[in-house]
Amino acid sequence: VSYTTPVSLTVLGQNPDLLVTEQSATELTITLRAPRSVQEQISRNFNQITARINLSGLTAGAYDLVPEIELAGFKPVQVVGIEPAEINIILEQISTKTLDITVLQTGSLPISYESGEAVLSSDSVELLGPLSKVSEVNDVVANIDLSNTTTTITRIVELSPIDRRGNLVEGVSLNPTSITVEVPIKQLVGYRNVFIKIVTTGTI
């Protein structure tokens, strides 16, 4: 009998220094051969059947692993089909790196205003992720828009890991994920803002 209810796949024995960066499937469908009485028992208690793959002893690399089906004591029964029959796994070494945070100011201030040096709640950030991703990160930036700003601003800004081309690098964790940025804004000497009063003369 082929069971359409999927069986969740459990990963065992993973080295804590490695990350699973690719896994071809997280669920399986199975076909079992058993007497009708046992089939009825399985149908009523199908959630007791589990599937697993064991990563014990594996180092960084790509692997094709055959899942093991645990039948929870149902007898007699034979596994005659598993779909997919193999699980493709890629394991990568966990890597960390600490980088200084770069503030990127965008937008234009009004004429006669200028910005000072930004003050950050944290000057550096720690990256954590697979070695292939962490090594791509060239900079971590905090983008802040100063458009039409005339007074000192304080904002919570999300951090973004980028590569040498300025593209966002996915799959990397940051600590912290955001920081507080204060940018002092002041008016240049010799300038002053005034209101304009419209005075009309003559008679309609």
Image: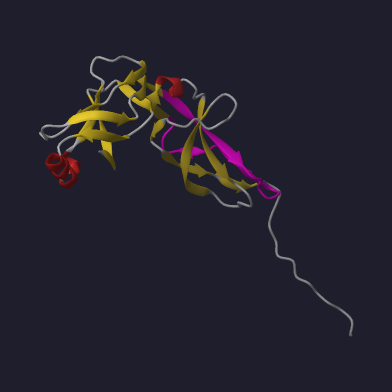
Res 66 quadrant in image: top left
Residue at 49% x, 35% y is 160
Residue nearer the viewer, 130 or 148? 130
> Is residue 181 in the magenta section?
no
Picture layout, residue 92 above or below residue 198 = above
Q: Quadrant of the C terminus?
A: bottom right
Q: Position of residue 153 (x, y in %)?
A: 52, 49
Asked if residue 11 can be seen in this view, the reply is no
Quarter of the image where one finds residue 116? top right
Give left or right: position of 22 versus 30. right
The x, y position of residue 1, in whole percent, is 25, 38
Residue 107 is inside the magenta segment: yes
Residue 156 in view in this figure:
yes
Residue at (89, 81) in percent of width and height: 202
Q: Is residue 3 left or right of residue 160?
A: left
Residue 83, compared with residue 55, is above or below; it is below
Nearest the eye: 85 or 190: 85
Residue lying at the far front in this picture: please name it: 36
Along the line of sight, the residue nearer the viewer: 163 or 6: 6
Please report the residue visible at 17 percent of the width from the left and 35 percent of the height from the top.
34
Residue 199, how many percent across, how many down?
Answer: 80, 74
Please give the name of the residue rendered at 19% of the width and 42% of the height, measured from the top-left corner: 46
- Seen from the viewer's position, the closer of residues 97 and 18 is 18
* Residue numbers of the magenta segment: 98-124
